[in-house]
Image (spheres, coloured by chain):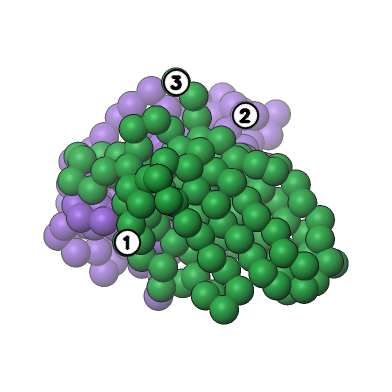
Chain colours: A purple, B green
């Protein structure tokens, strides 16, 4: 059963912020939110993860709502190289990590 | 730091033939995964190893798929006999041992693309 819901596809103009939403209304207290992306013909790549607080790294920012039922991945200045499928995953990785991928959001960055 | 190495990158076989894929994880990564990704879908976990032991193989079709990690380092995934529906990319990933604070950060190889005719 899917733990997350994401839009199938999104477009973003190069240089603008890309905001990718994810709903995870059944998330439990010990589950983290992970984001991965997969560029064409490559393996998935880890982006960021969080539990409750907002997180930022060199690639992106993760905003998690206070009730933790949804989150948004923000790519602050999208480039053509950010065109990829973005996966939002909810998982308890405290014990044995076993990430379950859905179908993700296909982000197309355009000129 | 060297990434996860996989071979071969591409393989074309006929149905009922056998095929084997090899994976060498990042040095020091005790946990290794094999995922199957069918075109248009997200990766699906087939098997997870912790060192040379199997943690989870509940989604591995054991009548035709087998995997081993004998010395707890590199791993081999075998399919015998192959079916048309096994056409997919087979992704290997590794991460830190269970109990490490960031076990959810998986490092994936580029995958092995299998076409079954």
- SS for dot 3: loop
Say which quadrant the N terminus of chain B sits in.
top left
Q: Position of residue B37 (x, y in %)?
A: 60, 58
Q: Is residue A20 left or right of residue B83?
A: left
Local crowd size for mark 2, using a 10 Å CA cut-off: few (<14), some (14–19), many (≥20):
few
| Residue A15 sits above or below residue B96 on the image | above
What residue would you read off at disc 1?
B55
**Of the pair A33 and B6, the residue shown nearer to us:** B6
Residue shown at 61% from the left, 74% from the top:
B64
Q: Is residue A69 left or right of residue B27?
A: left
* 1 or 3: tag closer to the N-terminus: 3
Q: Position of residue B24 (x, y in %)?
A: 51, 38
- SS for dot 2: helix
What residue would you read off at disc 3?
B1
Q: Position of residue B46 (x, y in %)?
A: 48, 64
**Of the pair A64 and A49, the residue shown nearer to us:** A49
| Residue B4 sits above or below residue A92 on the image | above
Q: Position of residue A50 (x, y in %)?
A: 25, 43
Residue shown at 35% from the left, 52% from the top:
B52
What residue would you read off at disc 2?
A81
């Amino acid at each position: 059963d899917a733990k997350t819901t994401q839009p199938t596809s999104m477009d973003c103009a190069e240089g603008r912020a890309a905001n990718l939403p994810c709903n995870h209304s059944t998330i439990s207290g010990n589950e983290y939110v992970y984001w991965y992306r997969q560029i064409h013909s490559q393996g998935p790549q880890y982006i960021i993860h969080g539990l409750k607080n907002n997180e930022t790294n060199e690639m992106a920012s993760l905003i998690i709502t206070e009730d933790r039922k949804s989150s948004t991945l923000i790519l602050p200045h999208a480039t053509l190289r950010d065109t990829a499928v973005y996966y939002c995953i909810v998982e308890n990785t405290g014990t044995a990590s076993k990430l379950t991928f859905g179908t993700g959001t296909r982000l197309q960055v355009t000129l | 730091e060297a990434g996860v190495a996989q071979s071969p990158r591409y393989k074309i076989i006929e149905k009922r033939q056998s095929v084997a894929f090899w994976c060498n994880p990042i040095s020091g990564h005790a946990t290794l995964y094999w995922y199957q990704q069918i075109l248009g879908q997200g990766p699906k976990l087939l098997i997870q190893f912790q060192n040379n032991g199997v943690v989870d193989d509940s989604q591995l079709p054991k009548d035709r798929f087998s995997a081993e990690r004998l010395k707890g380092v590199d791993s081999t995934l075998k399919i015998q006999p192959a079916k048309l529906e096994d056409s997919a990319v087979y992704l290997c990933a590794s991460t830190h041992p269970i109990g490490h604070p960031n076990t959810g950060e998986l490092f994936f190889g580029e995958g092995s693309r299998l076409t079954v005719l």
